[in-house]
Amino acid sequence: MITEQERAELKTLMIDRIAELEASIARLRERVETVSPDSAIGRLSRLDSMINAGTVNQAIHDSQAKLTRLRNRLERIADADFDQCRMCGQPLSIERLRAAPDRGVCTTCLSAKHA
Protein backbone atom coordinates (compact mmCIF):
# COMPACT_ATOMS: atom_id res chain seq x y z
CA MET A 1 0.00 0.00 0.00
CA ILE A 2 1.35 3.41 -0.93
CA THR A 3 1.56 6.22 1.59
CA GLU A 4 -0.21 9.55 1.26
CA GLN A 5 3.16 11.18 0.59
CA GLU A 6 3.80 8.73 -2.27
CA ARG A 7 0.28 9.33 -3.58
CA ALA A 8 0.95 13.10 -3.60
CA GLU A 9 4.29 12.51 -5.35
CA LEU A 10 2.54 10.36 -7.99
CA LYS A 11 -0.11 13.04 -8.50
CA THR A 12 2.58 15.64 -9.17
CA LEU A 13 4.41 13.24 -11.48
CA MET A 14 1.23 12.53 -13.43
CA ILE A 15 0.35 16.22 -13.77
CA ASP A 16 3.86 16.92 -15.05
CA ARG A 17 3.66 14.05 -17.56
CA ILE A 18 0.27 15.25 -18.77
CA ALA A 19 1.72 18.71 -19.43
CA GLU A 20 4.72 17.17 -21.23
CA LEU A 21 2.48 15.02 -23.40
CA GLU A 22 0.20 17.94 -24.29
CA ALA A 23 3.23 19.99 -25.36
CA SER A 24 4.68 17.04 -27.29
CA ILE A 25 1.41 16.44 -29.13
CA ALA A 26 1.24 20.13 -30.08
CA ARG A 27 4.81 20.00 -31.45
CA LEU A 28 4.07 16.80 -33.37
CA ARG A 29 0.95 18.30 -34.94
CA GLU A 30 3.05 21.21 -36.21
CA ARG A 31 5.30 18.71 -38.02
CA VAL A 32 2.48 17.07 -39.96
CA GLU A 33 1.99 18.81 -43.25
CA THR A 34 -0.12 17.79 -46.20
CA VAL A 35 1.96 17.25 -49.31
CA SER A 36 -0.02 18.03 -52.43
CA PRO A 37 0.55 15.90 -55.53
CA ASP A 38 1.37 18.94 -57.62
CA SER A 39 4.10 20.03 -55.23
CA ALA A 40 7.43 20.58 -56.96
CA ILE A 41 9.47 18.67 -54.39
CA GLY A 42 9.76 15.55 -56.52
CA ARG A 43 8.15 12.12 -56.32
CA LEU A 44 10.64 10.54 -53.89
CA SER A 45 10.68 13.56 -51.60
CA ARG A 46 6.88 13.60 -51.60
CA LEU A 47 6.80 9.88 -50.77
CA ASP A 48 9.32 10.44 -47.98
CA SER A 49 7.19 13.29 -46.61
CA MET A 50 4.11 11.06 -46.63
CA ILE A 51 5.97 8.28 -44.80
CA ASN A 52 7.25 10.78 -42.23
CA ALA A 53 3.72 12.14 -41.79
CA GLY A 54 2.47 8.61 -41.15
CA THR A 55 5.14 8.08 -38.51
CA VAL A 56 4.33 11.40 -36.85
CA ASN A 57 0.59 10.63 -36.94
CA GLN A 58 1.25 7.30 -35.20
CA ALA A 59 3.31 9.10 -32.55
CA ILE A 60 0.41 11.54 -32.05
CA HIS A 61 -2.04 8.66 -31.71
CA ASP A 62 0.19 6.84 -29.19
CA SER A 63 0.74 10.03 -27.18
CA GLN A 64 -2.99 10.78 -27.12
CA ALA A 65 -3.73 7.26 -25.88
CA LYS A 66 -1.18 7.64 -23.09
CA LEU A 67 -2.56 11.09 -22.25
CA THR A 68 -6.08 9.65 -21.94
CA ARG A 69 -4.84 6.82 -19.70
CA LEU A 70 -2.93 9.29 -17.50
CA ARG A 71 -5.95 11.56 -17.14
CA ASN A 72 -8.17 8.60 -16.26
CA ARG A 73 -5.68 7.30 -13.69
CA LEU A 74 -5.26 10.80 -12.20
CA GLU A 75 -9.02 10.95 -11.65
CA ARG A 76 -8.75 7.70 -9.66
CA ILE A 77 -5.63 8.55 -7.63
CA ALA A 78 -7.62 8.92 -4.39
CA ASP A 79 -9.28 5.51 -4.81
CA ALA A 80 -8.29 2.84 -2.29
CA ASP A 81 -7.45 0.38 -5.08
CA PHE A 82 -5.31 2.84 -7.10
CA ASP A 83 -2.14 0.93 -6.19
CA GLN A 84 -3.55 -2.48 -7.15
CA CYS A 85 -3.23 -4.22 -10.49
CA ARG A 86 -6.45 -3.85 -12.49
CA MET A 87 -6.11 -7.41 -13.75
CA CYS A 88 -4.99 -9.53 -10.80
CA GLY A 89 -5.57 -7.22 -7.83
CA GLN A 90 -2.02 -7.57 -6.50
CA PRO A 91 -0.34 -4.49 -5.02
CA LEU A 92 1.73 -2.41 -7.42
CA SER A 93 5.10 -1.26 -6.15
CA ILE A 94 5.80 2.44 -5.92
CA GLU A 95 8.58 1.88 -8.48
CA ARG A 96 6.06 0.41 -10.95
CA LEU A 97 3.64 3.28 -10.32
CA ARG A 98 6.41 5.83 -10.90
CA ALA A 99 7.61 4.11 -14.07
CA ALA A 100 4.16 3.64 -15.62
CA PRO A 101 1.53 5.65 -13.75
CA ASP A 102 -0.79 5.44 -16.75
CA ARG A 103 -0.99 1.65 -16.76
CA GLY A 104 -2.29 0.35 -13.43
CA VAL A 105 -1.19 -3.16 -14.38
CA CYS A 106 1.65 -5.20 -12.92
CA THR A 107 4.46 -6.41 -15.16
CA THR A 108 3.34 -10.04 -14.83
CA CYS A 109 -0.16 -9.29 -16.14
CA LEU A 110 1.19 -6.95 -18.81
CA SER A 111 3.55 -9.67 -20.06
CA ALA A 112 0.75 -12.26 -20.06
CA LYS A 113 -1.53 -9.87 -21.95
CA HIS A 114 1.06 -9.37 -24.71
CA ALA A 115 2.17 -13.00 -24.86
Image: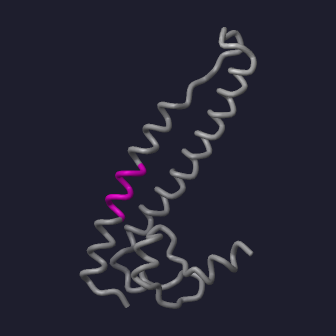
Above or below 89: residue 10:
above
* Residue 90 part of the magenta-drawn span: no
Q: Residue at x 42, y 61 (%)?
A: 71
Q: Position of residue 94 (x, y in %)?
A: 39, 82
Q: Which of 57 and 72 is in front in this view?
A: 57
Going by the image, does 9 lie left or right of 43? left
* Residue 15 part of the magenta-drawn span: yes
Q: Residue at x 58, y 39 (%)?
A: 56
Q: Which of 59 and 43 is in front in this view?
A: 43
Q: How many numbered discs sit on the rendered protein?
A: 0
Q: Residue at x 69, y 33 (%)?
A: 51
Point out the image quarter for the C terminus: bottom right
Going by the image, does 26 lie left or right of 48? left
Point out the image quarter for the N terminus: bottom left
Q: Position of residue 26 (x, y in %)?
A: 43, 39
Q: Give the range drawn in magenta.
A: 14-21
Secondary structure predominantly adopted by residues drawn in magenta: helix
Q: Which residue is drawn at 26% across and 83% down?
A: 4
Q: Where is residue 113 in the image (x, y as percent from the top left)?
A: 69, 76
Going by the image, does 112 lie left or right of 19? right
Above or below 12: residue 19:
above
